[in-house]
Amino acid sequence: MDSIVIQGGKRLEGAIPISGAKNSALTLLPCAILTDEKLTLSNLPRLADVDSFGHLMNELGVSTKIEGMHKGEIGRRMTLRAENLISTVAPYDMVRRMRASILVLGPLLARAGDATVSLPGGCAIGDRPIDLHLQALEAIGAEIEIAAGFVRATAPGGKRLSGGDFTFPVVSVGATENAVMAAVLAAGRTNLYNAAREPEIVDLCRLLQKMGAHIEGEGSPHIKIEGVEKLHGCTYAVMPDRIEAGSYACAAGITGGSVDLIGIRPEDMLATTNALVQAGLMIEFHDHGMKVSADGPLRPLALSTAPFPGFATDMQAQFMAMLCRAKGESFLEETIFENRYMHVPELRRMGANIDVRGRSAIVHGVDHMTGAKVMATDLRASMSLIIAGLAAEGETEVLRVYHLDRGYERLEEKLSAVGATIERRGGG
Ligand code: UD1
């Protein structure tokens, strides 16, 4: 199995192009199910999860064609066409490998009146149930049955969903996405209250609007949808990845460096940039993105994860790694997922001093970390080990690279280009 090997201690300096957002791509791709016309997505990141989603779409009968990039584009283009669906089932093997497969539930239900998706089961960062997805779909007219490890959602009589009102008891990105995708083709109106406000939700709504959907209030907690009979194809560019950008900002911070993050949208990542500034980094916005530079020693922080516009849970591990080298004690609280401190034992093996109590962690800054062989159980945890390795003395080998390949496009290439000594090593 491949690993990533880093010789730490190099200051990062230079420009990093930011790819299309993984989490956005994974909710834009299933929108192809909502029309029999062609949907072309550009700025798609080259990631294992995007490929897996493409395979899932093929199993459902959606054709996918990768096209060359157009001038000035950094990502891939994919044209999808769901002229005729051949299946309405997302099998266990797909959902087990990629939890986001659950996002075909809403669109299949809207288009075919019938959708069957395997229940996701356990997940490394906590239990992650799908009850909110099902409650929201039920509220807009679906009938739900659970049997033999699968959930089946149907529209009464195989017809259109009615639309309806639903208040999310807890903010959920995925459940909001499924509900929006199901409601756009409903016969009536849908009001979603306490909806997720993440930029990826706005990206989804913008694509659906371009396809002819009537949606208002995206980016606010109240999304209003007036169902339409038909959606049409279009071409749409995936938004830049705010989490990838934030991760490289932490890498700049821990190495005392300066990186220019090209292509980001500052308004998508204000909580991250605020935290970077509080940690003592300097941020300069410019036409093409923003420059993040170290400016003296790192300062400790108090951070608590929260739904957007709060501090993203997907940035927690990377900040924790950076704060291992801050001058003083940082306090972190994880409020979204239980079990999201899996990187802590590995960071400790590199010399970090971190106490965890339940959902809180105290990071006592240290002057020095040392390279080690480490492995992580999820994507962002793996990135935190890369960040720590960039500043650690000696060699760090991060195992289970497939986690990183799910979410960071050309990681070694991007970091080498700004001065890191990093390579992928093929294993047995
Ligand atoms: C998405 C992101 C993930 C990010 C997370 C929170 C994708 C592909 N993934 O995941 O990277 O970390 O948002 O920003 O976009 N919950 C329930 N019942 C449900 C659904 C969720 O209790 O039916 C709970 C979860 O266990 C969690 C919280 O709600 O505690 C938020 O989860 P949610 O926003 O749904 O995360 P995902 O959409 O799975």
Image: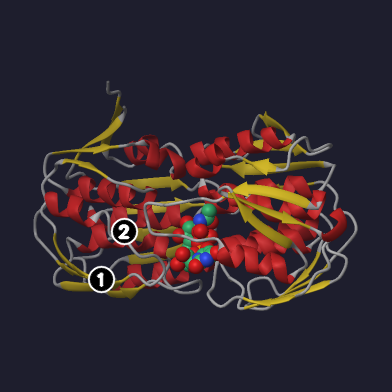
Question: Within 8 Å: ligand 1 and the Cβ of disc 1?
Answer: no
Q: Residue furthest top?
A: 428
Image x and y of residue 146, in percent: 62, 55
Q: Real-space Cα distance between discs 2 and 1? A: 15 Å
Category of crowding for the residue at label 2, using alpha-carbon neighbours closer than 10 angstroms: few (below 14), some (14–19), many (at least 20): many
Disc count in the image?
A: 2
| Vertical position of residue 327 compared to residue 231: above or below | below
Identified by mark 2, the residue type is Ala
Q: Which residue is mark 2?
A: 317
Residue at 27% from the left image edge and 23% from the top image edge: 427
239 left or right, relative to 295? right
> Considering the image in quadrants, where does the N terminus appear?
top left
Q: In the drawing, what numbered circle is on residue 358?
A: 1
Element at label 2? helix
> Considering the image in quadrants, where does the C terminus appear?
top left
| Vertical position of residue 408 compared to residue 139: above or below | above
Identified by mark 1, the residue type is Gly
Q: Earlier in the sequence, mark 2 or mark 1?
A: 2
